[in-house]
Amino acid sequence: MADPAKADALTQILPYEKSWGTVVLHINVIPTNNHFATKVLTTPVAVWEAAFKNNLAVDYIKTIKGLYCNDLTYIVFKREVVQYFTDSLGDIHGLRSTLYQDMAEDLFKEHENIFFNTNKESSIPIGTYIIGPDSCKIANS
C-alpha cells in the first residue's frame, strides 16, 4: 500500500482475524515502504476518512455532530452487489451475494459511532425481477 496514512488507518480499524464459517482471514496491513505514517491521526473521524480514501466502493463520507459531543460518521457505499466465496452449501457456486454496506457492518461491528449505508442514488438502474413466463426480464421501477 503506497499511502502510509491509509495503511496506518487500516491497521487501527481492521480486525486481525475475521471468520466466515470455516474460512478464516488473517489481516496484516503492510505499507509499500514498510513505514507507517509519522503523523498520528488524532480523531476517529480522521482515521475512517483516511482508511476509505480513494476507495472505489465508497460514494461519500459524512460526519455530523451527535448527542453528547460524539461525532457520527456515515460511510455511504455505491449501490452495487458484491459476490465472494463462502463455504455455504446454500449457493450452488459457493458464493455469497451482498452489498458493500453489509460487508462493512460485519467487518467493523466492534466500532462505535460509525454507520455504513448504501446510496439511494445510483447510475445502475435497479429493477424488479419478474417470475413467470417472462422470467429473467427486468421491469424498471
Image (cartoon, rainbow, N blue to C red):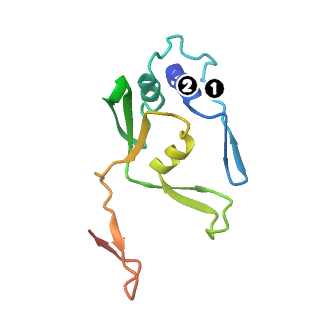
Q: Residue at x 64, y 63 (%)?
A: 94
Give the amino acid at mark 2.
Ala
Closer to us: 23 or 34? 23
Q: Residue at x 64, y 19 (%)?
A: 34
Q: Which residue appears farthest toward the front when viewing the image? A: 68
Q: In this rendering, is residue 66 above or below 134?
A: above
Residue count near mark 1 (Cα–Cα under 10 Å), binned few <14, some 14–19, many ≥20: some
Q: In this rendering, is residue 81 above or below 136?
A: above
Mark 1, residue position = 30
Please tell me in which quadrant of the rendered image residue 109 appears: top right
Q: Where residue 59 sits in the image (x, y, percent)?
A: 35, 41
Residue 1 seen in the figure: no
Secondary structure category for the residue under label 1: loop
Please tell me in which quadrant of the rendered image residue 96 appears: bottom right
Q: In this rendering, is residue 69 above or below 106?
A: above
Q: In this rendering, is residue 103 above or below 12?
A: below
Residue 95 seen in the figure: yes
* Residue 20, numbered circle: none
Q: Where residue 7 sits in the image (x, y, percent)?
A: 55, 25
Q: Residue at x 38, y 33 (%)?
A: 73
**Quarter containing the N terminus:** top right
Do the numbered discs 1 and 2 sit on residues whose CB atoms are within 8 Å?
yes
Q: Residue at x 56, y 37 (%)?
A: 110
Give the amino acid at mark 1.
Ile
* In-image side of 72 versus 108 (left or right): left
How far is the residue under mark 1 from the one under mark 2? 7 Å
* Lower position in the chain sequence, tag 1 or tag 2: 2
Q: Where residue 136 sits in the image (x, y, percent)?
A: 41, 77
**Quarter containing the C terminus:** bottom left
Q: Where residue 14 sits in the image (x, y, percent)?
A: 58, 33
Mark 2, residue position = 7
